[in-house]
Image (cartoon, grey):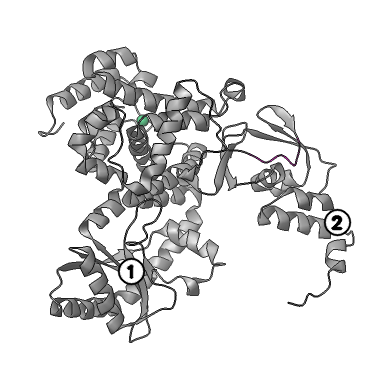
């Protein structure tokens, strides 16, 4: 407990401590350490009191004798509602492990996730804080659990943090998780980044001095600092550029924070007068913010000693928002917010986050029992990806439009090569059937089965394509496809 705690928060801490008494974490520490860590994270994010109280109590309904009613009596409807949302999310998640309880009438758990999300975005923020602390203490778990939680964090929670523009959280989560998902690659890339930063140190200092001098001459108020690229974002970028380090231009970036928008553009002009900007690398996210509300000017320049450096220029407010995202807007609107939430209004959201409004409206309809066409719903949450589940509850992400064979090859080429059928949500399905968000996919195999030419029409991922081609060629059959192809003229 800290001195700042309000009377309500102190009471919540006492209640949770009592409820979790005798329980321990895998680390051997008393369980209460975990809810208290979640409390601290939510405080750091500047969340409102109800969210902090719900964070302290987030595991009590699921794991202790406390009931939702106890919480309602003690802290009111709003806190109880948030705790309920977090509990539902985790029940939905656990339910996915058991195909029988998952089927048939709850269309999918993603829907339940949405209902919870639509009810109150603070539910997700508590869940993110919960996951962050679990990741920070992941070393105490057995390796198979570590991998599973880390993978889910990379595929669901870090993208979610990105969607809410919570930049600091996204980076910490992704790097913590990536270390468990692919330890070798993590160390490799970390060494690359460290080495690069060391070699760039001196010349970056020189550039920083030059820019500072020029900005001072123009009487611009500013702070400048280096920004180190995260391991996971480098990994992703390298994958996009065929592992070619030469195409990574933002390994080091300098970040300049100024007072207002005019100063942002002035600063951009000054930098371009000092160094040669690279073609096509000027991005105006101030005039055209990213979908998650991120705003900044980016430019990549070539310095006099032929170094490539990226600059990011933004105001203090934009910077705050880039790092803390939706949580930051809660901070600014804390007073108004709770009232708005009670009334179900959310007009405090930045316009770039209006997709949340859309989700909330859909969720409200679902709660009232109205029919909703989910296909019509623009789910910007995860852009072009779908998330499907193995019968054991592992989450597999695939590009939208993927088919069962894409899924099978994604699991393992040994599984892909021997597919004889597929069950989707417990029912036999055609290999042409497009997979949807939340589907539980079970692949049936037989040793005697081998890939056929016609399978090439039943996939959309290049990964599956290359595996099938490889197998078709290896099996000694003449490769009709390749033989017939004539050189094309363009
Ligand atoms: Mn928890």
Q: Residue sitting at 45 percent across and 21 percent down? A: 368
Quarter location, residue 297: bottom left
Position of residue 383 in the picture relative to residue 329 (left or right): right
**Magenta region:** 430-435
The disc, 2 or 1, on the residue closer to the chain's N-terminal end is 1
Q: Is residue 300 above or below residue 174?
A: below
Q: Which mark is residue 150?
A: none
Image quadrant occupied by the N terminus: top left
Q: Is residue 325 above or below residue 223?
A: above
Secondary structure, mark 1, is: strand
Quarter location, residue 68: top left
> Looking at the image, can residue 139 be seen?
no
Q: State the predominant SS element of the stretch in magenta.
A: loop
What residue occupies the far left of the structure in this picture?
A: 3
Q: Is residue 432 magenta?
A: yes
How many numbered discs sit on the rendered protein? 2
Asked whether mark 1 and ligand 1 are closer than 8 Å, the reply comes as no
Rendering coords of residue 487 (x, y %): 80, 75
Rendering coords of residue 426 (x, y %): 68, 27
Give the class, few, some or many, for how many residues have Cα within 10 Å of label 2's Cα (few <14, many ≥20). Answer: few
Position of residue 37 in the picture relative to residue 160 (left or right): left
- Label 2 and label 1: CA atoms lie apart by 50 Å
Mark 2 or 1, closer to the camera = 1
Q: Which mark is residue 475?
A: 2
Q: For mark 1, what is the residue?
A: 253
Q: Residue sitting at 41 percent across and 52 percent down? A: 291
Q: Residue sitting at 16 percent across and 25 percent down? A: 10
Image quadrant occupied by the C terminus: bottom right
Rendering coords of residue 369 (x, y %): 49, 20
> Looking at the image, can residue 70 be seen?
yes
Rendering coords of residue 164 (x, y %): 36, 45
Q: Is residue 431 above or below residue 481?
A: above
């Amino acid at each position: 407990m800290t001195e700042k705690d309000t009377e309500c928060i102190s009471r919540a801490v006492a209640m949770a401590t009592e409820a979790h008494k005798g329980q321990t974490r895998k680390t051997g520490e008393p369980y209460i350490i975990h809810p208290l860590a979640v409390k601290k994270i939510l405080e750091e994010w500047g969340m409102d009191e109800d969210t902090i109280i719900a964070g302290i109590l987030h595991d009590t309904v699921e794991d202790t004798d406390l009931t939702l009613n106890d919480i309602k009596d003690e802290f009111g409807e709003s806190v109880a509602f948030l705790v309920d949302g977090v509990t539902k999310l985790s029940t939905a998640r656990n339910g996915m492990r058991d195909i029988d309880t998952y089927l048939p009438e709850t269309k999918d758990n993603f829907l339940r996730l949405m209902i919870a999300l639509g009810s109150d975005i603070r539910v997700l923020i508590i869940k993110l804080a919960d996951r962050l602390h679990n990741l920070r203490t992941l070393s105490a778990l057995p390796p198979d659990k570590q991998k599973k939680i880390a993978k889910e964090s990379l595929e669901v929670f870090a993208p979610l943090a990105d969607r809410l523009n919570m930049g600091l959280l996204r980076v910490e989560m992704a790097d913590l998780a990536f270390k468990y998902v692919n330890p070798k690659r993590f160390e490799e890339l970390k060494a690359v980044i460290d080495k690069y930063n060391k070699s760039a140190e001196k010349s970056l200092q020189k550039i920083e001095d030059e820019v500072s001098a020029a900005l001072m001459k123009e009487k611009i108020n500013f702070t400048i600092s280096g920004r180190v690229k995260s391991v996971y974002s480098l990994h992703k970028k390298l994958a996009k550029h065929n592992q070619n380090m030469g195409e990574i231009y933002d390994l080091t970036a300098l970040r300049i924070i100024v007072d207002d928008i005019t100063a942002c553009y002035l600063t951009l002009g000054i930098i371009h007068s000092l160094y040669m900007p690279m073609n096509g690398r000027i991005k105006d996210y101030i005039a055209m913010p990213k979908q998650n509300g991120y705003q900044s000017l980016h430019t990549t320049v070539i310095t006099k000693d032929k170094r490539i450096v990226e600059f990011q220029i933004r105001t203090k407010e934009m910077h705050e928002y880039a790092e803390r995202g939706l949580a930051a807007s809660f901070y600014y609107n804390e007073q108004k917010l709770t009232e708005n939430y009670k009334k179900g209004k959310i007009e405090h959201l930045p316009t770039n986050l209006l997709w949340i409004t859309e989700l909330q409206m859909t969720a409200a309809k679902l709660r009232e029992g109205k029919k909703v066409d989910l296909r019509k719903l623009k789910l910007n949450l995860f852009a072009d990806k779908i998330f499907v589940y193995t019968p054991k509850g592992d989450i597999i992400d695939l590009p939208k439009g993927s088919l069962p064979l894409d899924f099978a090859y994604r699991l393992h080429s040994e599984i892909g090569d021997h597919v004889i059928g597929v069950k989707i949500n417990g029912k036999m399905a055609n290999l042409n059937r497009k997979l949807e968000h939340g589907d539980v996919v079970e692949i049936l195999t037989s040793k005697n089965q081998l890939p056929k030419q016609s399978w090439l029409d039943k996939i959309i991922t290049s990964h599956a394509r290359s595996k099938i081609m490889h197998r078709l060629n290896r099996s000694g059959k003449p490769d009709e496809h390749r033989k017939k192809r004539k050189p094309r003229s363009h």
